[in-house]
Amino acid sequence: MSSHSHVYVQGDVTIDPSAVISSGVILRANPESQMIIAAGVCIGAGSVLHADQGTLEIETGVNMGTGVLVVGHGTIGANACIGSLTTIWNASIERLTVVPAGSVVGDVGRQVAEVSPAATPPVDSSNPPEAVNHSPKIASSPSPSPEQSEQQQDVNPPVDSQRHSSESTTEEEPESADSPAGNSIYGQGSVDRILKTLFPYNH
């Protein structure tokens, strides 16, 4: 007969005398709940069994590792093996079942989901990002309309036309000087010069 004086027991808890319970184990049953530990059960050190809202039964030959947490109601089947640091929440374990260490059974909310690193979107090499032009913008003067360009041409005639008109006036002045008064003939001055060159003695 084993002594369970080193085990903390609270509430309606029934322990078979042949059960082996290590030190630091807590067995607790809430009001209107019950816990039954059958013969041949072995519970590792630091485990916590908490019956809530019903009956929590540990059947014959169950072997629990250290640090096991069983909360709620249900049944741990005969000769089942519960690995260390396992959590069982309001669930039952079938007989002869082996639960790996560190498992979480029954409580989906307590499972730790593996978070994968945020996937970086692939870079599309066929469509490179547009280059940003940081050069200062130079304001261009607006091009004149066709009507404005025609007005400028009328106001400022080409230089060649001005030069041509000045040369024509200078050529015509001596011709008008040599021609007799009242008989202005176009080109008379040129004819007179040619005649003087051919007949210098004939006036």
Image: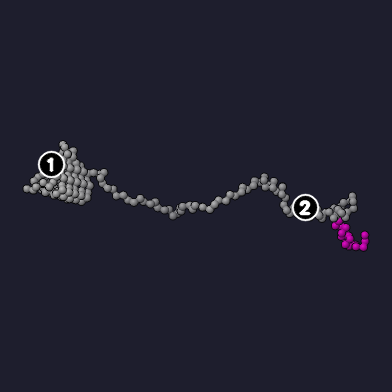
Name which residue lies at 41% across and 53% down: 123
Expressed as whole percent of the image width and height from the top left, the position of residue 162 reads 75, 52
Q: Per the image, is 195 magenta?
A: yes
Secondary structure beneath dot 2 equals helix
The residue segment tinted magenta is 188-203
* CA distance for labels 1 and 2: 131 Å
Indicate left or right for 39 with 188 as reference.
left
Q: Is residue 190 visible?
A: yes
* Amino acid type of the residue tagged 2 in the rendering: Ser
Which of these two is toward me, 39 or 31? 31
- Reading the image, the residue beneath label 2 is 165
Indicate left or right for 80 with 123 as reference.
left
Indicate left or right for 30 with 177 as reference.
left
User: What secondary structure is the magenta-colored segment mainly?
Assistant: helix
The crowd level at tag 2 (other Cα within 10 Å; few <14, some 14-19, many 20+) is few
Indicate left or right for 189 with 45 as reference.
right
Name which residue lies at 21% across and 43% down: 89
Q: Residue furthest left?
A: 1
Secondary structure beneath dot 1 equals strand
Q: Per the image, is 82 magenta?
A: no
Q: What colouring method underlies this structural image?
A: one colour
- Reading the image, the residue beneath label 1 is 13
Which of these two is toward me, 141 or 21? 21
Q: Residue furthest right?
A: 202
Q: Nearer the viewer, mark 1 or mark 2?
A: 1
